[in-house]
């Protein structure tokens, strides 16, 4: 795909939902430019972290540093909105106050993040960030919210703030890893419901991409195999460096009982002999279980950066260059 200039400043719009009819809109989404950009971005980030640990020295641009600071700010606001003490059956109502605070302050923190020449993009990228934290009304979180955050990161690259492919390793191993800890804290603090969960037959109640990108990290690991997740001491030793192990560790911290009973899909995957097959399987599963599931993508937003139109190059899912 030929290099493209970043989106010009006068084209930004407030993004909107377009997937409203499952029979008509979902198939169209699969062939859209938005789908092409999202999927190509996910694959580019997958390639960027092959055989890389979280602790590996990697370039961290000023953009990455500023995004990390933004995530720290979002984390610090949790202390300003403590959970309500009275018993609540489905999630803690204080989460609504937290999301309201984020929505009210989003413009200001994005003005701090972006240079002045990109401030006109704020109206378009803000909803992807706020929806990446969970649903304030339903008090829930699922893989669609994770997708929204990744869409936000993709938009930051399309407008030229984040530079691909130079920033790609840090986007996953710094930014996304920090995002995961933020949303895990939100899930625990406010007891967020796992929206759209398949119960025990889902991959994970909340996340998907730590398994996809996490298996890429482990692709050619000389010691750790997929079955290694069943060894508790390996989880403790390798969770800080590998998203896959950290995600399994998080499940153990929130669920009780035998692993094969509460997480049978992950248990079954642990029997796959090689990480390469796990990674390719996760990519296929992501397309099928996230991007092709109406309950998940019906909330995805479309605008000038993730356009609701036929893909420019269906056979080449390269994200537009930010050069």
Image: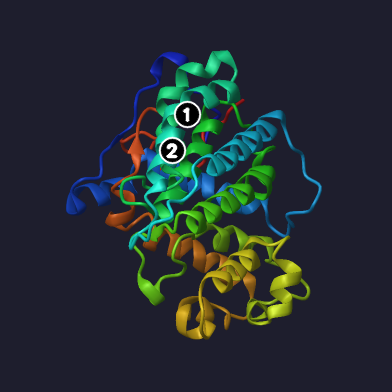
Toward the viewer: 34 or 117?
Answer: 117
* Quarter of the figure that contains the C terminus: top right
| Residue 96, x across and y down, in percent | 37, 43
Q: Which mark is residue 31?
A: none
In the image: residue 11, left or right of residue 213 = left
Q: Residues within 10 Å of mark 1 (few under 14, many from 20)?
A: some
Q: Secondary structure at mark 1?
A: helix
Q: Which numbered disc covers residue 106?
A: 1
Which colour assignment does the render follow? rainbow
Q: Dividing the picture into quarters, in which one does residue 73 lie?
A: top right
Residue denoted by label 2: 130
Please report the residue visible at 55 percent of the width from the left and 13 percent of the height from the top: 117
> Residue 247: image x %, image y %?
58, 65
Quarter of the image where one finds residue 291:
bottom left
Give 293 or 74, whichever is nearer the viewer: 74
Crowd class of label 2 (few under 14; some 14 to 19; many from 20; radius 10 Å): many
Indicate the quadrant where residue 294 lies. bottom left
Indicate which disc, 2 or 1, sits on the residue closer to the N terminus.
1
Q: Give left or right: position of 189 versus 226.
A: left
The reply to whether residue 305 is in sight is no
Percent x, y of residue 40: 50, 46
Compared to residue 322, the image places residue 276 above or below, namely below
User: Which residue appears at 38% of the width and 63% of the height?
Assistant: 289
Q: What residue is drawn where x is 73% and y is 76%?
A: 234
Which x, y percent locates residue 153?
Answer: 53, 38
> Is residue 244 placed above or below 10 in the rendered structure?
below
């Amino acid at each position: 795909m030929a290099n493209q200039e970043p989106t010009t400043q006068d084209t930004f719009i407030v993004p909107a939902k377009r997937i409203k009819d499952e029979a008509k809109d979902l198939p169209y989404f699969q062939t859209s430019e938005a789908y092409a950009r999202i999927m190509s971005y996910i694959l580019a980030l997958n390639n960027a972290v092959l055989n890389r640990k979280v602790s590996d020295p990697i370039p961290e641009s000023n953009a990455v540093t500023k995004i990390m600071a933004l995530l720290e700010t979002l984390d610090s606001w949790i202390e300003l909105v403590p959970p309500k003490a009275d018993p609540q059956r489905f999630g803690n109502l204080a989460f609504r106050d937290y999301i309201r605070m984020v929505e009210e302050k989003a413009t200001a923190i994005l003005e701090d993040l972006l240079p002045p020449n990109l401030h006109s993009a704020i109206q378009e990228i803000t909803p992807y960030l706020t929806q990446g934290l969970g649903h304030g009304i339903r008090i829930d979180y699922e893989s669609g919210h994770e997708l929204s955050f990744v869409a936000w990161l993709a938009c930051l690259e399309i407008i030229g703030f984040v530079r691909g492919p130079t920033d790609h390793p840090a986007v996953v191993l710094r930014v996304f890893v920090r995002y995961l800890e933020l949303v895990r804290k939100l899930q625990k603090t406010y007891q967020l419901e796992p929206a759209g969960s398949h119960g025990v037959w889902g991959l994970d109640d909340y996340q998907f991409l730590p398994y996809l990108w996490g298996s890429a990290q482990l692709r050619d690991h000389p010691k750790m195999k997929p079955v290694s997740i069943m060894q508790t001491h390996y989880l403790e030793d390798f969770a800080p460096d590998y998203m896959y192990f950290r995600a399994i560790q998080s499940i153990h911290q929130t669920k009780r009982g035998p692993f094969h009973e509460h997480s049978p899909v992950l248990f079954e995957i642990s029997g796959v002999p090689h990480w390469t097959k796990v990674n390719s399987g996760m990519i296929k599963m992501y397309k099928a279980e996230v991007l092709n599931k109406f309950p998940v993508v019906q909330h995805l937003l479309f605008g000038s950066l993730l356009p609701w139109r036929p893909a420019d190059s269906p056979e080449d899912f390269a994200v537009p260059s930010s050069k």
